[in-house]
Image (cartoon, rainbow, N blue to C red):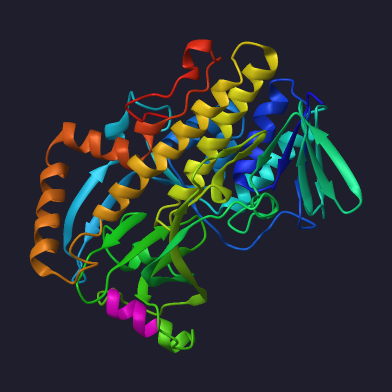
Amino acid sequence: MNGVVVAGAGPAGLAAALALARAGIRVTVLERENELPRRPRACTFHPATLDLLDELGVASRLVAAGRVVDRVQWRDRSGMVLAEMGMNRLDGLTRHPFRMHLDQASLTALLLEALNACPEAEVRFGAHVDGVAEGGTGVRVRVGHTWTLGRYLIAADGAQSTVRGALGLPLPRSAHQAQALRVFVDSPLDRMLPSLAPLTHVRDLQQSCTLFGLPDHWRIIFKIPCDAHEPLSPSNLSLLVRRALPGLGGPIRITGADRFWLSRGVLSSYRCGRVLFVGDAAHLTSTVGGLNMNAGIHDAVELAGVITAVIGGQAPAAALEAWAWRRRSVVLQRVLPPREARRMGVREHDSARLDAATAGLRAIAGDPDATRAYLAQASLLDTVPHTASWAASRAVPNPVGRS
């Protein structure tokens, strides 16, 4: 009964499980699918996340497989660079002063490999959670006709969380007035567009987009109207890409595309008795740049440290409530507001606001201290989790909202 059950083998669930197992806590992971999902998902890992993954022993291999992003760029459709910031301004704040682009499936594969080497861990695939029942000293999780027991249950089972459903907990959501179109391009865009950075935001009232350079392809994210139903044919997609990037020369090889709805929602509490929620099961932000995944990993690693301290007697059970309050505050106060503000002018099709936002970016890029502060916030370094051993004094909520 001193073990922990984790529902979901995504980045957050496996990170929590590995952190617990490394601390000597028995952990059982229940994953509804028969194998790790391989479909393209988030692809951005921020410096604060890489620091945490380094503590789990997987960061170096992840970085070796990915594409290092050493600068962030803003440009207009004509190709003019409006502003650029070097990630090296974060030197001294992090062991990884860069972003890294690689699909999250590469991370889950590394986490699973590390977890399989831990004798304290068990991973069960094809294990769909059908029910949850809490007792006085633990929680029971039903998979089919079998019950798995644990002292705590970490719900990391995604936006359609069955754990959340079993407990009758709603996740209120508000939809954006647009959907995202993600286009996969197998062309060397950084050779076709001079000085293109591996992370580039094209800001234009007519057609904005964000470009992500990965090791073997590029992803271009567009915001499109909710009622857009044009077929995702190569010709339509090629026309869209060329409209956003008219300076492209040579053929554009489009290998695929998908559309998904944008929404945001945050659970009223990340804790329900002995059940703790992390990642997409706790919050949805639909922000470009993988912030929801990164914040979910932070939720999970910090929670694993708190649970370890509670089980070991170094922290009271009230530390779990403090964790739940703190991590929710991070999303509400530090993740959502900055992300909403960064599309000012573009979202409203307001040229004056776009010009003002661009001037603001130029001013920041021209000031080393302002650049450092901007990139630290954009990289989640101002919400870095506490992963050190927990003292009883940390069981009270932090009034300033730091995670």
Q: Is residue 259 above or below residue 56?
A: below
Q: Is residue 145 magenta?
A: no
Residue 331, image x and y in percent?
41, 43
Left or right: 270, with 121 as reference point: left
Q: Quadrant of the N terminus?
A: top right
Left or right: 227, with 315 as reference point: left
Kindly indicate the quadrant of the structure image that contains residue 212: bottom left
Q: Is residue 349 above or below residue 53?
A: below
Does residue 321 appear in this view? yes
Does residue 101 appear in this view? no
The residue range painted magenta reads 238-244
Secondary structure that dominates the magenta span? helix
Q: Is residue 387 above or below residue 146?
A: above
Residue 55, image x and y in percent?
57, 26
Say which residue appears at 25% left-offset and 59% top-offset.
343
Q: Quadrant of the C terminus?
A: top left
Left or right: 250, with 118 as reference point: left
Kindly indicate the quadrant of the structure image that contains residue 190: bottom left
Left or right: 367, with 199 as reference point: left
Q: Is residue 239 magenta?
A: yes
Judge by depth and name the residue closer to the eye, 139 or 372: 139
Kindly indicate the quadrant of the structure image that contains residue 61: top right
